Image (cartoon, rainbow, N blue to C red):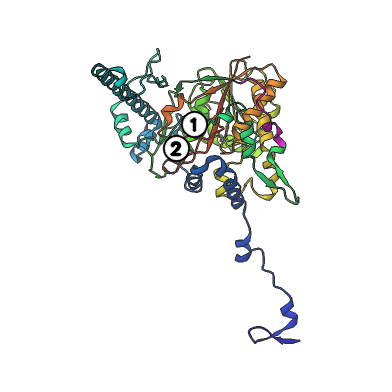
Amino acid sequence: MWYKNCLNKFVCINCAIIRRKHKDTHWSVIAKKKTAKDKALLHFDELYKSIYGSEWPSIRLALLSQQKYCAVVNNFSDSEETISALKKLGAVDIREVFKAELKYQENEEILIKDSRKKLSARKEKLSDSFSTNQLPGPLYDVSSKDTVSQGFQDSETDSSGKRLHENANAASLRSQLSQSELEYDRIVKPDLSGAVSASALHEFVPATKLKGMEDWVLESEHYSGYQESMDFPIVKKKEDTLFYPKYWNIFSYIRGDVSRYPHPSRGKAGVYNYYLLDAASILPVLALDITNGDRVLDMCAGPGGKSFLILQTLYPERLVSNDVQGSRVGRIKGVMDDYFFKLKNWSNNMSVSHRDGRVIDEENTFNKILVDVPCTTDRHAVLENDNNIFSPARVKERIRLPQLQTELLCNAMKIVRPGGTVVYSTCSLSPVQNDGVVHMALKRIWEETKIEMEVRDMKNALKATRNVFKFSTSQGLRYGHLVLPFLPNNFGPSYFCKLVRKK
Ligand code: SAM
């Protein structure tokens, strides 16, 4: 049967009533579909805007832009040649950047002290010439702010711990670098100070719709503890010095330089010459403070980037790189083969294990444990659809992340030797997965065991790294430190928190 449509054309009625549905692969269907990375971005826009405020647009832009890497020289390959090749490319040794930054800050402090002295001399002069009640208000508060001594130690530091002077290279390097814009002090609202981030975190808890369910399930439902006030003691200690491993040779391009590195190549010994990773990954390993004779567990090690960094310190007596996933264990072994094992040098000191980190029960075996947990991997989540934790199939896994992260951290605190160090880290901006998990784990350990943990505040120690990394000053960040993605040096996100077991 035929009829006239609105365009005055005859159409078959049988055809007209059948609405044509495009195939799933048709562009119009694809355009309407929200991919996992779209969902991730929507989620972050909702959650992170409320946390990072006016900083969020710049963090967002950096997250969506090209990530920056550093090249970690493999000491088991042709390291001298590799170092000179990297220098020729224009990359600089991060150690020198840290030293130059510290020198710069020391000079600034000297200048400030000088100007304070001059001002107080002026003030005295003025008070001589006026009677007290004629004096204007104070010109400058000379009593306030005493500089905190903080430092950076590396191979060139002498045994007494005295820092050596910056070399000419570093000085010129420093002048190339723009001044750090970081306002580093942690600003904490008075109303947050008591309950730590507990109440604040609750505000940040994101809502996520579960597939096939009508109601909104809050991540906080798995974490009702966030709502409770802090009812357990937290011991905090400041750390003033950053120990940079003597044998680390890590190179990066300076701020604003987004050049890429050539693909690593195999040297004479048959192993690759450098490993590329996000420079913010060095911070959790620096926080571990690996020294001679350490026995280290990298609890969630796949694919092996941080294990590689640990081995490059040449210090550990033993390293166990563990992962729960078979494919990730395979990747760790691949890295070890590509970078070490052909030399057989490390086979006695290093092993790979395939276990759930929550049930590793070798107590008193390790004095350093890195807990680099599975997380929302924010940068990956907004850039790649493959293996994206925001895909509908992984909603439950995502919602349970804080629980898994807390269990992993709790187990590390239980098995680490008294006096030993646990570093918890993520590559997420989520306060729930960062300080929130640390809070919950400390609470659980305090309630369930006699273990005493001390939180290390590394703010002073990290001053040397300020020219390279932009740290968060977000309210509610109380335990750890967070590197924010930042276009001129697009590293991170990387959160880490250092915990030392006292008993
Ligand atoms: N540290 C690694 C690096 O620097 O290359 C990255 C670690 S990645 C962020 C997290 C890892 O934790 C994943 O490889 C994942 O398979 C592993 N993982 C997840 N659940 C785990 C568990 N229960 N026990 C041990 N590892 C786990």
Regarding residue 319, the answer to whether it shows in the image is yes
Q: Is residue 233 magenta?
A: yes
Kindly identify which numbered label has been placed on residue 282. Answer: 1
Determine the CA span between mark 1 and mark 2: 10 Å
Regarding residue 355, the answer to whether it shows in the image is no
Choose top left, top right, bottom left or bottom right for residue 87: top left
Choose top left, top right, bottom left or bottom right for residue 362: top right
* Location of residue 122 in the rendering, given as x and y in whole percent from the top left corner: 26, 21
The magenta segment: 222-234
Is the residue indicated by label 2 positioned so its CB lies within 8 Å of ligand 1? Answer: no
Kindly identify which numbered label has been placed on residue 431. Answer: none
Q: Would you say 291 lies left or right of 30 here?
A: left
Q: Is residue 480 magenta?
A: no
Pointer 1: residues within 10 angstroms few (<14), some, or many (20+)? some
What residue did someone put label 2 on? 70
Quadrant of the image containing the C terminus: top right
Q: Are marks 1 and 2 in contact (CB under 8 Å)?
A: yes
